[in-house]
Amino acid sequence: AVESAIGGPVRRILSTDPVPGIRNGYRRPDQLGVDRLLGMVAARAACNGAFCVVDIGTAVTIDLVDSRGNHQGGLILPGERLARECLLAQTSIPDDGEIDADARLGRDTATAVALGARYAVASTIERIVSSHQDLTGEDISIIVGGGGSDALLAYLPPGSARLRELV
């Protein structure tokens, strides 16, 4: 059906397949999600040097690639909504769904919970990037994509870029 819709052949990509500009850095390459691998390929097409690619959805994936295209590894975190739902389910914090979308600090519980998750992701990204820069001296571009990328971009260092069609 997809071949018919696009008028051409479809090829299934596996995370163990060679891809342009990226070398899978997992100890067991088959365990890397193909979505993450293809996100790195897309980020490589937009960036020549080292980069940190972040896909923000239900889960947040963060992958670091050096300037030679070697995947250094990555992290998987709960996304903002999932982190919020988990916190609310496991505590007695009231579930008040109204969030101040423009706030930088919570002045109500719902906003404080949502921003806590957002800052946790942003801080993790900054820490990974700064640690790698300290070790290697490489400048690292931050490329973000996924449904939550617009909200997170404002919390990341200047120069971070959104790639609309990451995967």
Image (tube, rainbow, N blue to C red):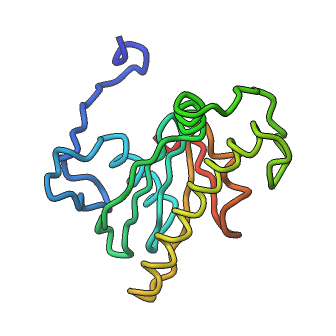
Looking at the picture, how far across and down is residue 91, in whole percent?
58, 34
The answer to which image quadrant residue 101 occupies is top right
Q: As drawn, which residue projects farthest toward the front? A: 92
Which is nearer the eye, 92 or 43?
92
Which is nearer the eye, 67 or 155?
155
Q: Report whether 62 appears left or right of 12.
A: right
The answer to which image quadrant residue 137 occupies is bottom left
Which is nearer the eye, 83 or 148?
83
| Residue located 80% across and 54% down the image | 105
Looking at the picture, how far across and down is residue 24, in whole percent?
24, 58
Looking at the picture, how far across and down is residue 103, in whole percent?
84, 49
| Residue located 15% across and 59% down the image | 27
| Residue located 47% across and 67% down the image | 51
- Residue 3's place in the image compared with 61, above or below, is above
Counting labels gives 0
Q: Report whether 123 appears left or right of 4.
A: right
The answer to which image quadrant residue 158 occupies is bottom right
Q: Report whether 34 appears left or right of 159.
A: left
| Residue located 58% across and 56% down the image | 120
Q: As drawn, which residue projects farthest toward the left? A: 28
The quadrant of the picture occupied by the N terminus is: top left
Q: Report whether 65 appears left or right of 100.
A: left
